[in-house]
Amino acid sequence: MEELIVSIEGLAVELGGNPVLRGMDLSVAPGEIVAVVGPNGCGKSTLLRCLAGLQPVSSGEIRVFGQPPADNAAFWRRVALLGDEPAWYPGLTAREHLELMGAVHTRPRMGVEAALEVFSLVERADAAPLNLSTGQRQRLSLACALLRPSTLLLLDEPERGLDAGFRARLSGLLAEYTAEGGTVITATHDQDLATHARRIAPSGVPA
Ligand SMILES: Nc1ncnc2c1ncn2[C@@H]1O[C@H](COP(=O)(O)OP(=O)(O)OP(=O)(O)O)[C@@H](O)[C@H]1O
């Protein structure tokens, strides 16, 4: 049987004494795109943080690549996370952030110039991230996450700040990622993105 990328059994998480996730079960196979959907506050980001090993769980079991997620180098070699906006390096331009990402990985998924094209950043490549618009910065975050090699992509609302044109291209970019053998789990409020995915609620049931 093909190894599951993610397997969750009976996951419960309390935050500040409030139950956020309650007895969640989930299995994700290689090559799937799973969209975690639901209203504000239902626990989508919490689930993503659990999968990234950044949120302690109250009970239950999470396995990512067959092991509990651990915030260590071996884990992050296989997992790329787009969460809150990253801490940008002072003094480095958008292009230099991508060059840095390319330089520290032996097999980047795309070259820096290709990434600037794909993420429509060519004209602002020499600007510092903090001098980009919100949507341009989000595209740079996505470019950094998709340039580096990984086999599991965890995305928390990747559509944040993007215009309609770029939102429409997101599902295509994720489809390319899974065509290369990757798996995607994304929290989203974007209908188009969710339509191209297996939709689940943070309870684990289909949505
Ligand atoms: N540190 C915390 N302490 C207590 N409660 C918290 C904490 N962080 C988040 N929560 C609560 O946990 C619940 C789930 O939050 P979470 O961020 O996972 O929701 P979400 O589904 O991602 O929401 P959104 O769609 O707004 O991004 C919310 O009710 C939130 O207020």
Image (spheres, rainbow, N blue to C red):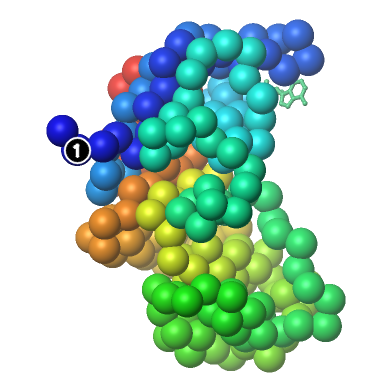
Q: Is residue 125 left or right of residue 33?
A: right
Does any portion of residue 193 appear in the rendered image?
no
Q: Amino acid at mark 1?
A: Glu
Is 167 or 3 nearer to us in this picture?
A: 3
Is 168 or 64 nearer to us in this picture?
A: 64
- Count up the numbered dots: 1
Quarter the C terminus occupies: top left
Residue 163 place in picture, x, y as percent: 51, 63
* 37 to 154, vertically: above or below: above
Cβ of mark 1 under 8 Å from ligand 1: the answer is: no
Q: Is residue 13 left or right of residue 107?
A: right
Residue visible at 51% across and 57% down in the picture: 77
* 66 to 88, vertically: above or below: above
Q: Is residue 108 left or right of residue 141?
A: left
Quarter the N terminus occupies: top left
Does any portion of residue 14 appear in the rendered image?
yes
Residue marked by disc 1: 2
Local SS, label 1: loop
Residue 170, picture quadrant: bottom left
Residue visible at 26% across and 37% down in the picture: 3
Residue farthest to the right, as pictured: 90
Dot 1, how many residues are within 10 Å of its Cα: few (below 14), some (14-19), or many (20+)?
A: few
Residue visible at 60% across and 65% down in the picture: 141
Residue 122 place in picture, x, y as percent: 54, 88
Residue 74 place in picture, x, y as percent: 54, 52
Q: Quadrant of ligand 1?
A: top right
Residue visible at 78% across and 15% down in the picture: 16
* 48 to 138, vertically: above or below: above
